[in-house]
Amino acid sequence: MKTVYTKNHILRNSKTELFGGELVKPFERPERMEYILNEIKTRKLGAILDPVNFDMDIIYKIHDKKYVDFLNNAWNEWVALGFKGEAIPTVYPSRSMNSDVVPTFIEGKLGYYCLANETSISEGTVEAAYESVKVALTAADMLDEEKSVFALCRPPGHHASKDQYGGYCFFNNVAIAAEKLKEKGAKRIFILDIDFHHGNGTQAIFYDRSDVFFVSLHGDPKDAFPHFLGHADEKGSGEGVGYNCNYPMPPGTPYDVWTKSLDDSISKIQNFSPDALIVSLGVDTYENDPISFFKLKSDDFFDVGRKIASINLPTLFVMEGGYAIKEIGVNTVNTLKGFENE
């Protein structure tokens, strides 16, 4: 399986994350990619290719222009005001306050466009986010000739909605890749999100559409980030009713329970008969992940890959989460090797 990857992900190298009431070293950090890349090379998964340039206007098919403008300018606005640290919002449009007017001051803008303030904006953040989109688009474009491709994206994307960032995500890579496949002629796309955390952004983007079926297997939002989306009764709206499905699961869920949700998802994929499958590949379902609570073991990821391969569709894997740094490479490549039945 070919991998698309860019060393420019390093442009996103923030130093702070709000966690447990402290500013700590971010869980989502550049070393994640190095462990995955080393495992790909060691186990000879396949060629590693650089992304190519694309017309970035495709982003506007997914994200609001004012939101993109905000991302393009946020860091410069922050620095121009003399702030010394990384940009973290301190105020939000809460349920008791009007949220329809976008503030002009950067502090208010950050709060308006941010869904979770663990994610700081630092120098190079938006540039890295564009590079991540290029990786996803390049990999999607390769599905013409390849049966499967791995987009080694960083920063990840599935928490980014039409006009909000957070959960380490800025642009929604899988959603943009889905639009690319639609441009190339695909009529129906299935997005399978197996990251531990619910893909709230992807769900919100496609919630009223019937051409993109979204399924997410994740920690119950009553107990896990992002907390306010991802419940089992969220089925879609308008034309999208019946094309959204969530499988929230409780703390301590082992693989033999988790995989029942995967099996049910596979039946939905087969019934939907999509032209292509996009997998939001998060390996933070691993038993020792520091910010998750499922109990999958490294060998379980082989079986995850085999099950996805059994669907027999053109498949684009897009990297999302996974924060057990030393094991992230093993678990990621185990999934991809399982898909290739190795």
Image: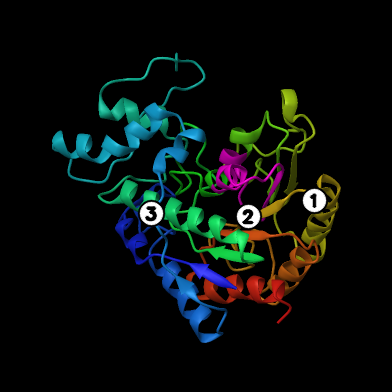
Q: Which residues are magenta?
A: 177-202
Residue closest to the eye, 258 or 37: 37
**Tag 2: amino acid:** Phe
Label 1: element kind: helix
Q: Is label 1 in contact with label 3 (beta carbons under 8 Å)?
A: no
Disc 1 and disc 3: Cα gap in Å? 31 Å
Disc 3 and disc 2: Cα gap in Å? 31 Å
Q: Is label 1 in contact with label 2 (beta carbons under 8 Å)?
A: no
- Give the mark nearest the N terminus, 1 or 2: 2
Task: Give neighbour class at mark 3: few <14, some 14-19, many 20+ (Cα, 10 Å).
Answer: few
**Is residue 315 in the magenta section?**
no
Q: Which residue is mark 2?
A: 196
Q: Which residue is mark 1?
A: 269
**Tag 1: amino acid:** Ile
**Tag 3: amino acid:** Asn
Q: Position of residue 298 (x, y in %)?
A: 65, 75
In this rendering, position of residue 88 left or right of residue 153: left
Q: Position of residue 30 (x, y in %)?
A: 38, 65
